Image: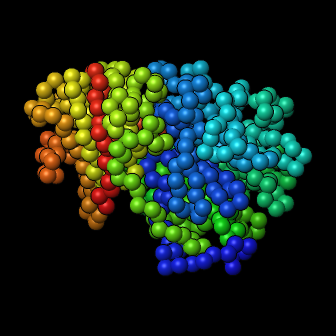
Amino acid sequence: MIGKFRYEVGEEDRMTFTNPVIAGMHPDPSVCRVGDDYYLACSSFEYFPGVPIFHSRDLVNWEQIGNALDRPGQLALPPGTPSSGGVYAPTLRHHDGRFWLITTNVAPGGGSMILTADDARGPWSDPIPVPGIGIDPDLAWDDDGNCWCTYAGIAQIRLDPTTGRTLDGPHRLWSGGPHAQAPEAPHLYRIGDHWYLLIAEGGTERGHAISVARATSPNGPFEPCPANPILTHRGSNRPIQNTGHADFVQGPDGSWWMVLLGVRPGGGTPGWHVLGRETYLVPVTWTDGWPVPGDLTPEMTAPWPVKPPAPPQARDDFDDPELHPRWISVRSRPAGSWSTTDRPGWLALHARGPSLDNPGVTFVGRRQQHPSCRVRVLLDPGAGRGGLAVRLDERHHYELEAGDGIVRVTARLGSVLHTVTTRPLPAGPVRLRIDVIAAPDGHWHPTQGPDELHLGIETADGTFQTLAQLDGRYLSTEVAGGFTGRVIGMFATAGTVLFDWFDYEPIR
């Protein structure tokens, strides 16, 4: 017996786990506990559907169960939405028997919104607009039923969450340490006799940090923790960097933890991160009424049994009428742009733009989640043109494109568009493959990139014919800027292109 929870521990149970607990571009995590279940939401930026929703029973192994913004009527990301624009920093809470989610769409014509659901899997309601507030909004309820919305800045309003109407405020609260930039990501909690205000500060790059203050009232005045920032990896050589944007939660045994974002830089100087900001888990203890995070490392120990994760499904055969919620598209996915019924068992993509430079390109991809991975597709370009791409944004992407009798490797690096190589297209369906090979551990050179991408054709017997080897640093946040990570997927740039299957496998 651990607290009020009982476990039957078998040989398959273990106490250790690996950070990040949700790998790949899953930043700004917000978590809530409902009984023995945990639910978590993340930012999604310019991708549709928006706000991935995850479920866990142990805080460690997470399964994506849906997306909160999965209907075009809920999420408008017009072509003018910049890369790294779109949907920022949701807060997910469970109150009075319902799930509540508040987030901000920074696209043209967007704004902050509240959604509700009886089941975190959905369906989620249509958005309720919340005008006049900043990004990173949070929801908290006091014992009198008042709903407080705190947002980046740090400011607060009292609102009616059923209508989005402001009832009082805004009022300035506490904005972190002196001279610290970008006070953001506020979360407000009632714990014991105090209200705690947890924020991020220092910017979401290497200076990112987590600080906290407390008060006896949800609207202050707030007393800063004397140990602020309570967690930061700035100025260190730790393998996890950019740590910030945290949310408190209690574990299965009643202990306290934080989910937070971080990155895994690779290569030489300045260190390039390519997977985006990921979700990590760190323990929290309490000293003199203040939270004290433990050491955040790639290998961690939980005080409760943690079962090994289920092996990931490597192949999607596109046999189901709907796509798995892990699949995302750039800004929109109109019904006429894709189908799994045109040729049953194949994903048909119908072109909407001539290249991945186009903000409305037909693209269906998934987040790269491992430093080294192998991605393969079997496609039939027919009279169309399309293939397999690694995308960071419109100005930074590599692709293998099949059509017009050739296979072409293209690299878009900012203002430079370069055809690296071409090869005659084999007859019939063709297997395209990209191997992402991370820089080896234990070898460091100041100018070494984080990884190398090998793009080519795979024969039926598995032989890999490499057409190009490209430096991965150019598809990193440190080069491209912004807030996102790599997405690897299928695209069509002319006509209709058919995909029989898509394989994603970690190499190590």
Q: Is residue 158 above or below residue 207?
A: above
Q: Quadrant of the C terminus?
A: bottom left
Residue 90 place in picture, x, y as percent: 62, 41
User: As drawn, is 243 to the left or to the right of 345?
Assistant: right
Residue 111 place in picture, x, y as percent: 64, 27
Most foreground residue, 295 or 62: 62
Most foreground residue, 323 or 468: 323
For the question of whether residue 175 can be seen, the reply is: no
For the question of whether residue 217 can be seen, the reply is: yes
Residue 409 place in picture, x, y as percent: 19, 34
Q: Is residue 178 above or below residue 408?
A: below
Most foreground residue, 370 or 171: 370
Q: Quadrant of the N terminus?
A: bottom right
Q: Residue at x 50, y 47 (%)?
A: 26
The single residue placed furthest to the left in the displayed view is 424
Most foreground residue, 267 or 22: 22
The quadrant holding residue 372 is bottom left
- Which color scheme does this rendered protein use? rainbow
Q: Residue at x 67, y 33 (%)?
A: 125
Q: Residue at x 70, y 38 (%)?
A: 116
Residue 123 place in picture, x, y as percent: 63, 38
